[in-house]
Amino acid sequence: MTFDPASFVFTPQAAPSEIRASTVLPARRENVEFTTEDGKVLLGELALPESGEVTATLITLHPLPTHGGFMDSHVYRKASYRLPALAGVAVLRFNTRGTQSPRGTSDGEFEEGIGERYDVEAAVRFAVERGLPNRWLVGWSFGTELALMYGAVEPVASEIEGAVLLSPPLHRATDVHLKEWAESGKPLTVLVPEHDDYLQPVEAARRFSLVPQARLVGVDGAKHLWVGEKYATRVLNEIVDDVTRAGAGVDGLPREWAGSVANA
């Protein structure tokens, strides 16, 4: 059965409570689907602030589906649970072609990042057509490859502000793609775990030196999958700092919530 985000049950609180890994804050959530240029129907979810302006839009590109990556990979799930309420940020998550999650399975099959170009283009086009402002690609692992390969060229480049990369392996993305980002002049933030399995901060600094405007952040203690609430929180704070005018604040996003909450 397809998961319905409207099934979350929100309960008022008598006092503020700590935001935990499973805490879901209020938002307008809907299942969405969109079709690629080559005819694949992709399934996803859009989470919007309950009220007020949308300060930024995250178009998330998930880790490698052949190794367990999908739209519900934990950092993106937590982004959709928290950022609409805490920062006014819209979060679009979706399964690339052939990828399965509780939302359902997108059409097609994994194409090693080649056919997925159409997936990136379709997601950005969906965000544009929905009128979602201040659009940013956020890639994680395999998703960083898609952001680097297709984010700085048309038809995507003119429709996004920049990108945030989490744990880039730089396997499929090459120096050619890095130079395209450099030429685009678009902001690029690169979060690299100290103990990453594929690319660690020193080598990442060397590789990304091809992109003068890139901001590279080595994160002490973190690993490729950003396991642990401490590291997921760090990622969300860095993203909000980059994509919104107000940022996450000196102390980061709030760690407590006084309104209604649900649990995932």
Image (cartoon, rainbow, N blue to C red):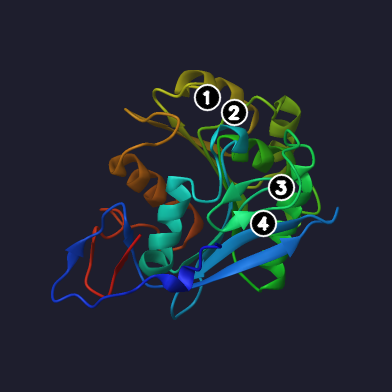
Q: Which label is found at residue 181?
A: none
Q: Quadrant of residue 34?
A: bottom right
- Measure how far apart labels 4 and 2 are at the Cα level: 20 Å
- Along the horizontal axis of the image, is 127 left or right of 263? right
Mark 3 or 2: the one toward you: 3
Estimate the x, y position of residue 20 in percent, counting from the top left: 26, 54
**Disc nearer the start of the sequence (1/4):** 4
Q: Tell me the SS state at disc 3.
A: loop
Check if mark 1's residue and mark 3's residue have beta carbons within 8 Å: no
Q: Earlier in the sequence, mark 4 or mark 2?
A: 4
| Lower position in the chain sequence, tag 3 or tag 2 | 3
Residue 69, position in %: x, y? 55, 40
Q: Earlier in the sequence, mark 3 or mark 4?
A: 3
Q: The residue tagged with tag 4: helix, strand or loop?
A: loop
Amino acid type, mark 1:
Ala
Q: Which residue is mark 3?
A: 97
At horizontal 56% and vertical 66% (from top left) the residue drawn is 46
Q: Identify residue for label 4.
A: 160
